[in-house]
Image (cartoon, rainbow, N blue to C red):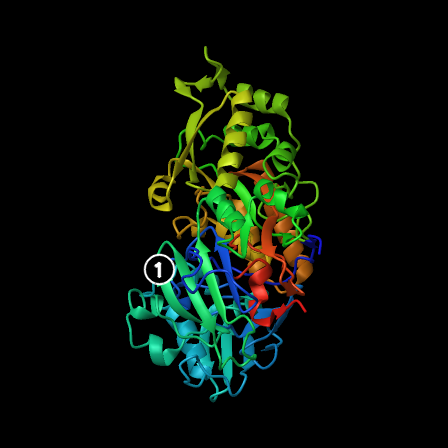
Amino acid sequence: MTARTVRTATAMATAAVVLTAATACSAPGDGDGPGGTDSLTVGVAQEPETLNPLLGYGKEGNSKIFDGLLTHDAKMNLKPALAAHLPKVSKDGRTYTYELRKGVTFSDGKPFTSEDVVYTYETILDKKTNNASKGELDAVESVRAAGRHQVVFRLKYPYAAFAERTVLPIASRAVAAKTDVNTGSYNTRPVGTGPYVLTSWRKGEKLSFKANPHYWGGKPKIKRFTVAVIEDDDVRATRLRSGDLDGAILPPNLAKPYEKDPEKRTFSAQTADYRAVTLPSGNPVTKDKSVRRALDLAVDRKAMVKSVLGGAGKPAYGPLPTDSPWFAKGTERRHDLSRAKKILADAGWKPGKDGIREKSGRRAAFTLWYFSGDKLRQDHALAYASDAKKAGIDIKVQAGSREVVRPKLKHDAMLMGNGFPADPDFDLYPTLHSSQIGDGWNNLAHYHDKTVDEQLDVGRRSRDAGVRKAAYDKVQRALAKNPGYTFLTHIDHVYVIDDKWRGLTTQLEPHDHGIGAGPWWDLQDWQPEK
């Protein structure tokens, strides 16, 4: 059997998949390692902070432990999960009614009812709950149970993307309500309705799961699932090569050798995942719009796609990919070093003796952080710094953990990643709206543009696709004139996996790519190769 490369090029429509799951791989022979077709061990880069959906885990779906009211098919179309049907929506767009699937139980045997749904959403919206993503449910005015198998949401305003938010996992009220929502045992010992049950979690190493024999969708053929947390890309590639892993996500250059391996399959999934540099308004250099505009032109995006991504991606000019139906054509910025230099010179930034520009005694210099072990971010950061230096801007590239980097971002830049394909609101609003400044990892540049704020509000509150498209076009054109970030690339996610199963696919993927994305997005439905 020859190696096969599967490329997914689905249209951008509905929601996505968040799921950064994790675990590190077991040594062969410890009971969780790679084996036949009834078990799977995969390597991912990041570990979740919690497994509690009340705190944000699995909010884009495919969490393996939980189900949402809705989920997605391979083409990212919404379909029922814990709901029996797609929701009924009132004419004013403010009432969503969900009929629930009957006969569903949690993995501990307790029945799933409307009370679990109400509890989940009300708890997330509670001010005492430390869920950094609760702003995504700002539109919800109330949620109530109308009997055991019906839930009614009332919105403050029509929110076209609301159904996409209901892929959010549903927690067990009977179990979760007995513990502290922020610090209790549900964070590490969750109980859900999903196809798998957590059996152990070794922090910083691995998560182990077993098939849920009572799963309403049928018992999975893959009985054991282990997710190895391996932050370093090179180490992940080495462990895949040594046989410790059945599959892994890899940077394109590390995955390429496997394309000719007869025992492996290589998957390249299209995504909404972008890489960008935050240019904080709190930094005396990057707060200058002329510097931000110059950097936007000095960067050679096409060269980055070729050299950093090995062609597995495309240039990025904002959060939305250029092949998205919501992308504003004409907002592409070509590489123009001469113009970048002129913008800086006209703004008073003159070359110093060492070639680095200065203005009023200040050098055009700042620090750019990336997360340790992330080779893709490192390579993006180094290429960006190299391009910037040609324009006379000195960028010091530095690695650090999330704990080290996060407190520095009011002043320093970061090589960030994000992207959700479900709806343009999901990418544009948290990244660019001024109300999101200081809200978790949102709007890290502290970006504030009046036109952008106004049009994001229009796009969020309208159900008219034409009105929304016009609003988001204005947002992207304003961003091109007043960039708060330098958007670099949209990257394809590349996976390598043993060729033992049939019918494997990928979805249009978000930034996060743990257990919820990749070829194992629908692990519960896998069938062994005959």
Q: Is residue 420 in view from this perspective?
A: yes
413 vs 18, nearest the viewer: 18
Where 399 falls versus 508 (above or below)? above
Q: Amino acid at mark 1?
A: Arg
> Quick one: SS at disc 1?
strand
Would residue 92 be found to the left or right of residue 178 on screen?
right
Horizontal and vertical percent position of residue 5: 69, 52
- Residue at 59%, 47% in the rendered image: 475
Horizontal and vertical percent position of residue 54: 39, 68
- Residue at 59%, 40% in the rendered image: 253
Residue that mark 1 sits on: 202
- Quadrant where the N terminus sits is bottom right
Residue 420 placement: quadrant: bottom right
Would residue 15 be found to the left or right of residue 147 on screen?
right
Horizontal and vertical percent position of residue 471: 62, 52
133 vs 152, nearest the viewer: 133
